[in-house]
Image (tube, rainbow, N blue to C red):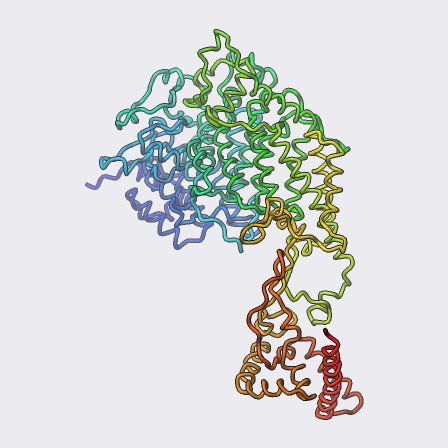
Amino acid sequence: MLWIPQWFAKAIFDAPLEAAMAFPHLQQPSFLLASLKADSINKPFPQRCQDLVKVIEDFPAKELHTIFPWLVENIFGSLDGVLIGWNLRCLQGRVSPVEYSIAMEFLDPGGPMMKLVYKLQAEDYKFDFPVSYLPGPVKASIQECVLPDSPLYHNKVQFTPAGGLGLNLALNPFEYYIFFFALSLITQKPLPVSLHVRTSDCAYFILVDRYLSWFLPTEGSVPPPLSSSPGGASPSPPPRTPAMPFASYGLHHTSLLKRHISHQTSVNADPASHEIWRSETLLQVFVEMWLHHYSLEMYQKMQSPHAKESFTPTEEHVLVVRLLLKHLHAFANSLKPEQASPSAHSHATSPLEEFKRAAVPRFVQQKLYLFLQHCFGHWPLDASFRAVLEMWLSYLQPWRYAPDKQPPSSDSQPRCVSEKWAPFVQENLLMYTKLFVGFLNRALRTDLVSPKHALMVFRVAKVFAQPNLAEMIQKGEQLFLEPELVIPHRQHRLFTAPTFTGSFLSPWPPAVTDASFKVKSHVYSLEGQDCKYTPMFGPEARTLVLRLAQLITQAKHTAKSISDQCAESPAGYSFLSWLGFGPTDTNGSYPANDLDEMGQDSVRKTDEYLEKALEYLRQIFRLSDAQLRQFTLALGTTQDENGKKQLPDCIVGEDGLILTPLGRYQIINGLRRFEIEYQGDPELQPIRSYEIASLVRALFRLSSAINHRFAGQMVALCSRDDFLGSFCRYHLTEPGVASRHLLSPVGQTQVAGHARGPRLSLRFLGSYRTLLSLLLAFFVASLFCIGPLPCALLLALGYILYASAMTLLTERGKLHQP
C-alpha cells in the first residue's frame, strides 16, 4: 500500500485549487525545485512571482528550505557576478512599471519573500555561505584563523574536512538573505556608461531605503516578524553571542569554532531581544559588506604610490552608503533627551535604545573612516567625486537628521550648530580634520574653472563655515594636543582601539568623562599609536588653504577672461570658421576647461561658487582682507606689457625647462600655457574641420605623384634667373622655409635641418572655403550668362595676373633685403 506523506496530502487537498493546478506532479521536494527552475525560464515574470507567492503560502518549511538558496540567488544574482538575477539595480518604475511593482511588493519587508525567511527562521535552518566572497580583510582574517572583530561572524565559521580552503559560514535564513542582498551591490558588474540609470529611482536603492526604515525605526519599535499563519508563533531570535574581546583564538580550528554560551540564557530570556536582533544583523551586514574592504594595516600599505588597489567602489555603491548614513543619523538621533543623556546609561533601558546609542560608534565609525580615506586618496579627479563628497558631508552633519531640527529659514544665513553636538564632533575629529586636509590636496589638483569642481569646493566650505562648527573642531584639536597629565589613576591607561565586539546587549562600558582622553582614544583607534596628526588649524593646513584661496582667485580671473572672449565673439563665428572664412588656429589649441561648452550661465555659476567659497574660507580660517587682496593684485603678473600671457612658472634645468608645482597648477587651471606651433611638413598637418578629409587625401596622393614624376623639371625651372623662374619659385617653394627655426622657450637656436625642394601643393582645393568660392564665382557668372568654361578661363586668367603681380612684388622685396 502506497503511503502518502501528511505534508503532501495537505498540499494537494487543502491548498487552493490554483496551487494544485500549478504543481499537480509534485511528490518530492526536489520536484518543487526542478519545477520552479523550469518556470523561471518558460514563464513570464509576473506569473513566476504569483506562483512563488502560492508556494510560500502553501508549502511547509521542510520543503521550502530546499528552494531557498536557489530562490535567493535567482533574485539577487550569483556571488561571482555571472547571473544577474532580477537585475534590481536597473529595474525602474518609469521604464518597467509592471515588473517594478511586482518585484517591490514581493521583496518588501512585509512581503512574501520576508515571510518565507521568517518561516524558515522558526525551524532553525542553516545555510552555507562561502567565506571566499566576503570582503578582503574579513576573508583574510578567517583564513588566518583569527576571528573578525564583528560579532556577525562569531560561532558561524565552519571548516570542511579538506582544510582551510573550503571555509563556510553557517547562516540562519535572515542572515543568508541579507548577505546576498547586500553583496549584490558589490559582486554584480558595474552598470555600463551608455546605460543612463538614476540610482535613486532603481528598485535596489528603494529596497535599501525600505529595509532601513523598517528595521531602524525612528518612531516606535521594529515591527514583529510576520507569522506564517494567523495566530502562529513568531520565530525566536537566533542564538546570541555575549561580549568577547577581539583577539586571535589560536591556530587550531577548534578554537575558532568554540561556542561561548555564558549569559546566553539571560539574553534569550529577554523578550525585547525579539525586536532587535534583526536590526543589529541588518546593520552589521550592510556595514561589513559595503564598508569593511580596508583594514588599518591595509590602509597604511595603500599610502604607497605603488600599491595596487584591492577594491574600487563605484558611484552607485557610494550613493547607497550615503543612504545608510542618513538613516543611521536619523535612527541614532531619535532617542528622547532623557534617553540620550549620559546618566541614562546607568538606568535600565530597552535594547532598541541601547542599540541607537551604539550603532554609529560601535559598528560604523572605524570602517567608514577607512573607506573615506581610500576614496579621498584614490578616486579619479573628476566630477564623479561629488558622490563621495556628499556622503562625507552627510556624516559630518547629524543635526540635519535630528527630529528637533529647525525649519529652513527665509534668510541665507546658516544656522548655528548647537553645543550639544560637540561630543559628536570630538569623537569624530579625524572625520572633520584629516579628511578636510585630504580634500584640500584634491582641490589643489583640479580645474577650479569647471563649474562642477567649483561647486564641490563651495559645498565643503559652506558646511565647515556653519557658525560654531569651526570652534568645536578647534576645541577638539586642542583636547587631542593637550599633554597627558601623569595622574595615578590614569597611569595604567593605554590608548587602544575599543573592542567593538559582541552584541550590543553586552554590558556597555562605563562612560569616559575625560574629554581629552576620549578624543585621543578616537584618534589612536583609527590611525594607530604612531600616527602623525596634522591639525586642521595648524600652519601646514593653513598654507594649503592659502594656496587654495590663490587658485580660487586665479580661477575666477580665468573664468572672467573666457566669458569676455565669448562675449566678443560674433554669433556666427563658429560657422564662418568652419567654412574657413574666420581666423583659424592652425596649431589646434583649445581651452583647458568646459566653460566653452556650457555657456554664460555656467560662467556665472562658477564665479558665484568660487566667490562664496572664498568668503567661507575667510570665515573659517580668519583670513585677512589684505591676504585676499594680495592674491588679486598678483594676477597682474600673469600678463606682460604686450598683453600676452607669460609662460607657466618653471626653472631652467640641464635638459631645458622644468615645471614647478605652481606651473603645473597654472596649466591645469588654464591660467598659462606654452605657445605651440606646428613646424612639420605642411602637407602632413592634421586634417582641419574646414577641410574635406577624403578630398584632402586624394589631392595629397595626386600632388605626391606629380612631384615625384616632375621633380627634376621643377628644380630646373626654379633655378632660372628670369621671370619664369621667379614665377615658379613663388608657387613651388614654401615662403620663409629658410628662416624657420625650431622654437624653444629657452631660445631659438636650432635651425630646421631639412630643406625641402620645389613641389606642387593642391591641398587648398580640399577646403570648404575654396570650393564655396568657386561655386559662388560660377553662380555669379551664370547670372551674366557666362558659361562654366568661359568662367573657368576668366578665373585662370585673373589668377595669372594676380600671381604675376605678387611675383614682381616678392622679387622687389628680396632686392631691398640686406
Residue 334 seen in this snapshot: no
471, above or below 652, in the image: above
Q: Position of residue 687 (x, y in %)?
A: 60, 70
Residue 484 seen in this snapshot: yes
The residue depicted at 68 percent of the width and 88 percent of the height is: 722
Q: Nearer the viewer, residue 350 or 651?
A: 651
Q: For residue 737, what is the image quadrant?
A: bottom right
Q: Position of residue 789 (x, y in %)?
A: 70, 92
Q: Position of residue 719 (x, y in %)?
A: 62, 85
228, above or below 18, in the image: above
Q: From the viewer's perspective, is 140 left or right of 305? A: left
666, above or below 278, in the image: below
- Count of residue discs: 0
Q: Quadrant of the N terminus?
A: top left
The residue depicted at 26 percent of the width and 26 percent of the height is: 254
Q: Position of residue 487 (x, y in %)?
A: 50, 8
